[in-house]
Image (spheres, grey):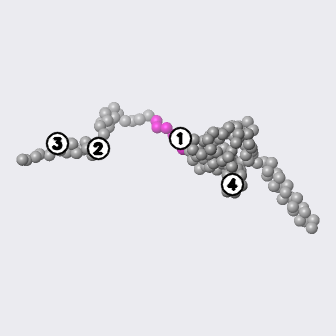
Amino acid sequence: MKKQTVLAILVLSLVFAAGLGAESFMVKSVQGMVKYEAAPGVWKTVDKGITLPGSAVVNTGFNSVLILTSGEKTHRLGAMQKGSVEQLCSGISGSTGSIRLVSRAGKSRVTAEALKARSSISTASTRASEVVGDLEWEE
């Protein structure tokens, strides 16, 4: 009986300690339709001033913006994002769905003559008109 009691206290203290380490996020502003999963399959609207745990799953709609604060940091979640608040705020790959610019083109080696040659766009109709001029017709 004592072993079960000690084990239960140990498990409860671990759960409590894990809860203290979890980050929470305060909703500073909401624009558009933003929902969070309050329970499995139950979605509620995010309102200004509520506190969301880091494990809460949020879903931002089209043309929506969610601004959260945690400590002294401010996080902005844009439209069409779904995932846990911690993942979306930390920018973990695959959660935001946004495209990041990795590098930019350096100096171009294309000469001015090459650029002039590219200015005429070849389409099916321009190629057909060029071919008609090359054919000889007999009547």
CA distance separating discs 2 and 1: 32 Å
Q: Earlier in the sequence, mark 2 or mark 1?
A: 1
Secondary structure mostly seen in magenta is loop
* Residue 109 seen from this side: yes
Query: Which label sits in the foreground, 3 or 4?
Result: 4
Query: Which residue bears the numbered disc 3?
Result: 133
Residues at badges 3 and 4 in contact (C-beta under 8 Å)?
A: no
User: Residue drawn at (62%, 44%), measured in percent from left and top?
Assistant: 33
Q: Position of residue 121 (x, y in %)?
A: 30, 39
Percent x, y for residue 79? 59, 43
Q: Nearer the viewer, mark 1 or mark 3?
A: 3
Secondary structure type for disc 2: loop
Q: Amino acid at mark 4?
A: Val
Which quadrant would residue 23 be assigned to in this image?
top right
Residue at mark 2 to residue at mark 3: CA–CA distance: 16 Å
Q: Mark 4, residues whose alpha carbon is within 10 Å: few (<14), some, or many (≥20)?
A: few
Q: Which residue is mark 4?
A: 42
Which residue is tagged 2? 123
Tag 3: amino acid: Gly
Q: Say which of 136 and 66 sits in front.
A: 66
The correct choice, above or below, for 3 with respect to 106 in the image is below
